[in-house]
Image (cartoon, rainbow, N blue to C red):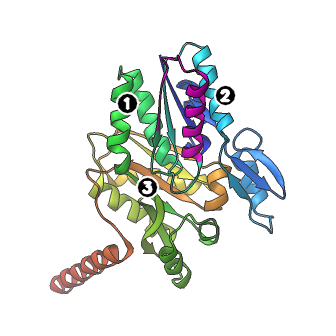
Amino acid sequence: MIKIMADSTCDLSKDIIDKYNLGVAPLNIIVKGKNYRDKVDIQPDEFYKMLESLEESPTTSMPSPDEYLKIINRAVENGYTEILCICMSSGTSGSYQSAVIAKDYYFENNKESSIKIHVVDSLSMSHGSGWLILKSAKLLEAGYSFDELIEFNETYKTRVKHFLCVDDLKNLIKSGRLTNASALIGKVLNIKPIMSMRKGKGAIVAKVRGRNRVSKFYVEEFIRRVDDKITDFIIIGYTSNIKIANDLLSKIKKETYFKGEIYVMQMGAAVGTHVGSGGLSMFFVEKRHLKDGLVKNEIRFLKEKRKNIIKNIRGV
């Protein structure tokens, strides 16, 4: 039997975690010196309400190797012989390394064990790793073997496309989740920055003005990039405002051909500590690893704007 496990930044809903019997190692959130385990001691809505009145930003820490080891041991006791662990990017957290330590510790103490354990560095954040985990669970249900699941994750993890917009960059800058160059751009420009992942870390790839333009960008990029053979579902993430997530859901249904399932899921306290209130994200698999970046997208937007101006002039 195959067990799939993760850390709590995958931000999958309780229904999905229960349906596929996923093992989840919680990250820790420290608020005013008090430690909370993500989605165990503190739930997302409770956290975002608390966040509004905090003067000092909360901090997070990775799951201990012992948290992973507990899941591994329980899985073995329950008859699982193969364990696939999918973690958030090693570029943003020590969660992956903690899982690797747990794996090594298990085999040091069980030298004769025939159990197989593979740990994936998803190079993703939040529902990016969540997308891989949910897809793996669906593939397992469809009959994929352990080796096939490993191959899928290691092949497609660089093509899970992230888009994330936040109202305020201060938490991401402070925590080092943004590169220095991206942080500088975000500070200087009075805009809504849109981020994606680059080499396992967050980077600003576009800037827009207004929430409606954020959704417009997401939908246009989805149409341009999506691998519709692999992407049979989309995940939309939000922190504190489900309305903006549902608005994006409606826009995707109205303006694209996509007929697969669209999940709307809340980001937990561990991710929310760095994203803050008003976060909106979208996740799918792109056709190939298309390059993007702030300058590249600005040039493309200017070309499109020029084309529309010429079209309007000719139409007069």
Measure the alpha-carbon separation of dots 2 and 3. Answer: 31 Å
Write down the quadrant of residue 55 in the picture: bottom right
| Residue lying farthest to the right in this orientation | 33
Residue type pointed to by label 3? His
Residue type pointed to by label 1? Leu
Q: Quadrant of the C terminus?
A: bottom left
Is 143 rendered above or below residue 98? above
Q: Where does residue 88 sit, x and y in percent of width and height?
A: 52, 47
Secondary element under disc 1, as helix, strand or loop, is helix
Q: Do labels 1 and 3 touch, CB within 8 Å?
A: no
Q: Which residues are magenta?
A: 95-119
Say few, some or many: other residues with alpha carbon within 10 Å of mark 1 (under 14 / 14 to 19 / 20 or more).
many
> Residue 253, can we see it?
no
Q: Where does residue 271 sit, x and y in percent of width and height?
A: 61, 53
| Residue lying farthest to the top in this orientation | 79
Say few, some or many: other residues with alpha carbon within 10 Å of mark 3 (under 14 / 14 to 19 / 20 or more).
many
Q: Do labels 1 and 2 touch, CB within 8 Å?
A: no
Q: Which mark is residue 162?
A: 3
Instruction: Identify the residue at image location x=26%, y=52%.
Output: 288
Write down the quadrant of residue 33 in the picture: bottom right
Q: Nearer the viewer, mark 2 or mark 3?
A: 2
Q: Do labels 2 and 3 touch, CB within 8 Å?
A: no
Earlier sequence position, callout 1 versus callout 3: 1
Q: Nearer the viewer, mark 1 or mark 2?
A: 2
Residue type pointed to by label 2? Lys
Measure the alpha-carbon separation of dots 1 and 2. Answer: 23 Å
Tally the marks: 3
Earlier sequence position, callout 2 versus callout 3: 2
Measure the alpha-carbon separation of dots 1 and 3. Answer: 21 Å
Earlier sequence position, callout 1 versus callout 2: 2
Residue denoted by label 1: 149
Residue denoted by label 2: 70
